[in-house]
Amino acid sequence: MATKLTLRMDDRLINRAKIYARRSGKSLSQLVADFFTLLGQTSKDEKPSISPKVKALRGLLKDSSIHTREYKRHLEEKYL
């Protein structure tokens, strides 16, 4: 049974979430439901499952000359 839920959030956050949902091909309600489902699946002792695509990327930049602060700056410029 589906029940209506009201959430109060900052307008900018809501707009960003709607854009993300649209790009993901999901409704905002589905994104919130997926998030709550994930919260219930993991415990402190249990690691969340990692998709095969993400596993393939693990260690890819291990020997890279990119420093953490440079990467953080790149992410801030890209997403903020």
Image (cartoon, grey):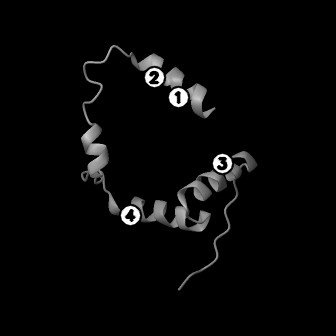
Q: Nearer the viewer, mark 3 or mark 4?
A: 3
- Pointer 2: residues within 10 angstroms few (<14), some, or many (20+)? few
Q: Quadrant of residue 57?
A: top left
Residue at which label 1 appears: 75
The Cα atoms of the two marked residues, 3 and 4, are separated by 24 Å
Q: Earlier in the sequence, mark 1 or mark 3?
A: 3
Answer yes or no: do the residues labelled 1 and 2 have beta carbons within 8 Å?
Answer: yes
Answer yes or no: do the residues labelled 2 and 4 have beta carbons within 8 Å?
Answer: no
Q: Earlier in the sequence, mark 2 or mark 4?
A: 4
* Residue type (three-letter) at the residue carrying disc 4: Gly
The Cα atoms of the two marked residues, 2 and 4, are separated by 31 Å
Q: Earlier in the sequence, mark 2 or mark 3?
A: 3
- Indicate the quadrant containing the C terminus: top left, top right, bottom left or bottom right: top right
Judge left or right: residue 80 versus residue 39.
right
Q: Residue at x 59, y 66 (%)?
A: 27
Decide which of 33, 64 is in the foreground and name it.
Answer: 64
* Residue type (three-letter) at the residue carrying disc 2: Tyr
- Pointer 1: residues within 10 angstroms few (<14), some, or many (20+)? few
Furthest-bottom residue in view?
Answer: 1
The Cα atoms of the two marked residues, 1 and 3, are separated by 16 Å
- Pointer 4: residues within 10 angstroms few (<14), some, or many (20+)? few
Q: Position of residue 3 (x, y in %)?
A: 60, 80
Q: Earlier in the sequence, mark 3 or mark 4?
A: 3
Residue at which label 3 appears: 16
Q: Secondary structure at mark 3?
A: helix
Residue at which label 2 appears: 71
